Amino acid sequence: MPFAVELYFDEATDVAIRRLWDSLGERDLSTRGEDASHPHLSLVVSDGHQPEHLREDLSNLNWSVLSHMRFRGIGYFKNPGVLYLAASPTVALLELHEQTHHIVNRRDPAQVRPFYRPNSWIPHCTLAMPVIPDQLPRALEAIGPGMETVEARVTGLGMWSLADHEPWKLDIDATDSTEQVIDVRDPTPSQHLSFE
């Protein structure tokens, strides 16, 4: 099952990005909020089938050295049509990405998607997809001014199932089916907080 290893943000950043999603959605642009996702930055996306074995390995990542992250403007991947907040590629962020890639790739060699491999990865937070070039003026109007720089505090690391758009429940014996965000440092899943 394809999955992502993600960084999560503080409440203020979460709320700000959700408002952007809402504004884009009001202009009939498809946003990440439609799949029950939450604002994040994906370190690695893999088509591997062993995410349940990664908890111990990922728990050794020192992601907390990346206490803050800066987004500096809006970016666009023409193929496959992704509008995003562009994160500054600091040394700490690039090192964390490389370490995460090493852990995931060791379990499932060659399963990490090409755009998430070292020297190809562009750190970003997706705002809307798919967005065709003709929709860009409407998208930028929806975003409005004031997004030149966003300071985010990194508050957690987790995994997300891309198959069913739900947080990955690494505790496979858990019977609680409510939405969860997984903090890989803690074997007990914590409840996802909604910042509506």
Image: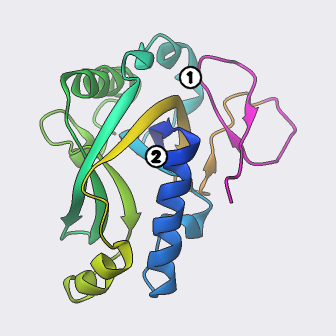
Task: Look at the image and say whether residue 182 sits in the magenta stretch.
Answer: yes
Local secondary structure at mark 2 = strand
Height in image: 92 above or below 167? above
Q: Residues within 10 Å of mark 2 (few under 14, many from 20)?
A: many
Q: Residues within 10 Å of mark 1 (few under 14, many from 20)?
A: few
Labels 2 and 1 touching (C-beta < 8 A): no
- Dominant SS of magenta comes to loop
Front residue of this view, candidates 47 and 37: 37
Res 13 label: none
> Residue 102 at what x, y percent from top left?
30, 21
What span is colored magenta in the figure? 173-196
User: Is residue 26 shown to the viewer in this render?
Assistant: yes
In the image: residue 32, left or right of residue 186: left
Height in image: 191 above or below 80? above
> Residue 111 at what x, y percent from top left?
33, 39
Residue sitting at the far left: 119
User: Is residue 161 shown to the viewer in this render?
Assistant: no
What kind of colouring is applied to the model shown? Answer: rainbow
Identify the residue under disc 2.
40
Indicate which disc, 2 or 1, sits on the residue closer to the N terminus: 2
Task: Look at the image and say whether residue 72 sits in the magenta stretch.
Answer: no
Q: Residue at x 44, y 17 (%)?
A: 64
Q: Residue at x 34, y 35 (%)?
A: 69
Q: Amino acid at mark 1?
A: His
Distance in Å between CA atoms under marks 2 and 1: 22 Å
Q: Residue at x 52, y 53 (%)?
A: 162
> Residue 60 at what x, y percent from top left?
47, 10
In the image: residue 140, left or right of residue 190: left
Identify the residue under disc 1.
53
- Say which of marks 2 and 1 sits in front: 2
